[in-house]
Image: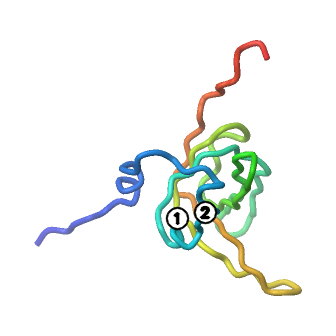
Amino acid sequence: MHKVIIRLGLVLIAQAAPLSVSELLADPDRFYGQPVVVSGTISNIRESLRRTPIYTFDLSDGIQTVFVMTFRKPPCQSGAVTVEGTFETTNQRMKASYAYEKIFAHNMTCLPDRRPKGK
């Protein structure tokens, strides 16, 4: 008897090019529950210290921003990053109920700074 293991990372690597945040949010129904690879700029990193640390941050392409959650500490604190994960909707209830989109990240890669040197 053989066990077959399918790793999510292998599916994500096969995707041609990362989406921008705007491309992702332009057609969210198409991507709900799907593995995605999205590139953008990381900012506003937060750590929730509960039993298991949860890290959250904003991922932006300069036009739109999506919320990202992960159990792994982001490898970079700012700059360009590629996020691999699952696109989801979360229902939040505080004073009123509302839904928002998020990526539950499985892997993140910091991208090199592409600004010209000396600027």
The relative height of residue 30 versus residue 55 in the rendered view (above or below) is below
Where is mark 2, residue-wise? 103
The amino acid type of the residue labelled 1 equals Thr
Percent x, y of residue 58: 73, 54
- What residue appears at the point 55 percent right and 42 percent down from the top-left corner? 109
The amino acid type of the residue labelled 2 equals Ile
Dot label at residue 100: none
Q: Verify CB contact (< 8 Å) between mark 1 and mark 2.
A: yes
How far apart marks 1 and 2 lie (CA) works out to 5 Å
Percent x, y of residue 28: 59, 68
Residue that sits furthest to the front in the current view: 26
Secondary structure at badge 1 equals strand
Residue that sits furthest to the right in the current view: 95
Where is mark 1, residue-wise? 86
Percent x, y of residue 78: 73, 39
Secondary structure at badge 2 equals strand
Image quadrant occupied by the N terminus: bottom left
The relative height of residue 25 versus residue 33 in the rendered view (above or below) is above
- What residue appears at the point 75 percent right and 46 percent down from the top-left corner? 62
